[in-house]
Amino acid sequence: MTSVSDSGSDPDPTVWRVLGAPLLPPTGTGPLDGLSVAVKDLFALEGFAVGAGNPARLAGAAPETTTAAAPAALLAAGASVAGIARTDEFAYSLAGTNVHYGTPPNPRAPGRISGGSSSGSASAVSLRQADVGLGTDTGGSIRVPAAYQGLFGIRTSHGAVLVEGLLPLAPSFDTVGWLTRDAATLAAVGEVLLPDAATHGATASFTGMSVPPELLATAEPGIGEAIREFVAAAPELQPAATVPFPVEELPGWLAAFQTVQGFEAWQQHGAWIEAHPDSLGADVAGRFATASRITAGQAEAARDVLRAARQRIREFVGGGLLVLPSASSVAPLLTDVAQSSALGGSTIDAVRRATMQLTCIAGISGLPALSLPLVTPGGLPCGVSIVGPVHRDLDLLRLACRLGPR
């Protein structure tokens, strides 16, 4: 085992909190034999504390006595845990820019941010230091780094994968997800973590596909162009005529989503944060400060909005597919993020808000969202998100395999 604080030969501390050879060996054999996993620093691993991307949290945490359900299932299927990967603090960010440990590299777009909050998991996979990046997705934390780094990723149906042993952020939206360099590996992990999908009535086909131009228009033009070319070149994706997506509702839906997310995040972590003032980076501290002021009444009113939105989104998707950008932009430049932070964060906040208007659609509806890698006309990685019916996760993963490499 190699700790990132031990010596000059240590692994990149922006990517790894601790790295082994392996850190945890397989506990069984199966379809994941030979694969290595980078585990986001939110999952319990026996013998290791959960740090959640914060050194004060790590210093005060006791080693876990059991391994969380998701990594335990991967170990039982033949995979090994390569190490514990970095995350944005408490997973409350989409950027990957952890003030304590730095920003993991983005080898597909050097000089640009990695995306988060499953930042270290994504970079470990991009750097070929792991085959699978196990992470979480509450508001886009799998789909955004997948888009920024040209990876395959999936946010699973809410509740489809056990979250036992996972440090929560907002339980109403928290899901387990993972990232890989190819569709076949993405699907192989799904066959292990989603063994009961067939009991939900899943079938092999979908009842059509919607590519709402009004959703493509919310992203940078190059991303919309890449998605249109992708759809046109994919025989399996047959767009069907649909009513327009209610894009005008997105700002209100996002506001309700963030209200409930913030309220639940404060319920989970507020007491610790109050006991550890000045322990958070400015961006995450600001979100928690806002969260601390949300009342139970405001949260319940927001839940009323979300219940109606959930029904509308599920009715819109039906038994088909909804295609939209995984993120509203390509990965911002590190220099732009640094300048934005110095000026109060207005630029990166705008990117986050625009992206979350897209990513919150799956979060609100509880539907699975597959992210496939594309490239803009300018040669930068981006992603297309395919949202499917609830508990059709495995069918989405098998669709990704049929679509072939991008």
Image (tube, grey):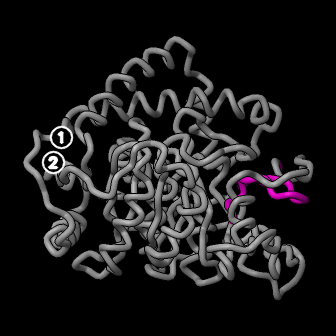
Q: Please give the label number shown on residue 159.
A: none
**Image: 153 above or below 139:** below
Specify the segment rendered in magenta: 39-56
Would you say the magenta stretch is mainly helix, strand or loop?
loop
Q: CA distance from mark 1 to mark 2?
A: 7 Å
Of all residues, the one furthest to the top in this rendering is 297
**Image: 226 above or below 340:** below
Q: Kindly identify the residue that appears in the image at 49 percent across and 48 percent down.
A: 344
Q: How many marks?
A: 2
Q: Is residue 31 left or right of residue 68?
A: left
Would you say residue 97 is visible in this rendering?
A: no
Q: Kindly identify the residue that appears in the image at 18 percent across and 52 percent down.
A: 208
Q: Kindly identify the residue that appears in the image at 51 percent across and 82 percent down.
A: 107
Q: Quadrant of residue 224?
A: bottom left
Q: Kindly identify the residue that appears in the image at 82 percent across and 74 percent down.
A: 25
* Place of residue 229 in the rendered image (x, y in percent of width and height, measured from the top left): 16, 72
Would you say residue 199 is visible in this rendering?
A: yes
The answer to whether the residues at label 1 and label 2 have Cβ atoms under 8 Å apart is yes
Residue closest to the eye, 347 or 198: 198
* Place of residue 38 in the rendered image (x, y in percent of width and height, measured from the top left): 67, 69
**Image: 196 above or below 40:** above
Q: Count neighbours of disc 1 (C-alpha within 10 A) and say few if under 14, some if 14 to 19, many if 20 or more.
A: some
Q: Is residue 4 magenta?
A: no
Question: Which amino acid type is shown beneath numbered disc 1?
Answer: Phe
Q: Which residue was labeled with disc 1?
A: 245
* Place of residue 398 in the rendered image (x, y in percent of width and height, measured from the top left): 39, 66
Question: Which amino acid type is shown beneath numbered disc 2?
Answer: Glu
Q: Which residue was labeled with disc 2?
A: 214
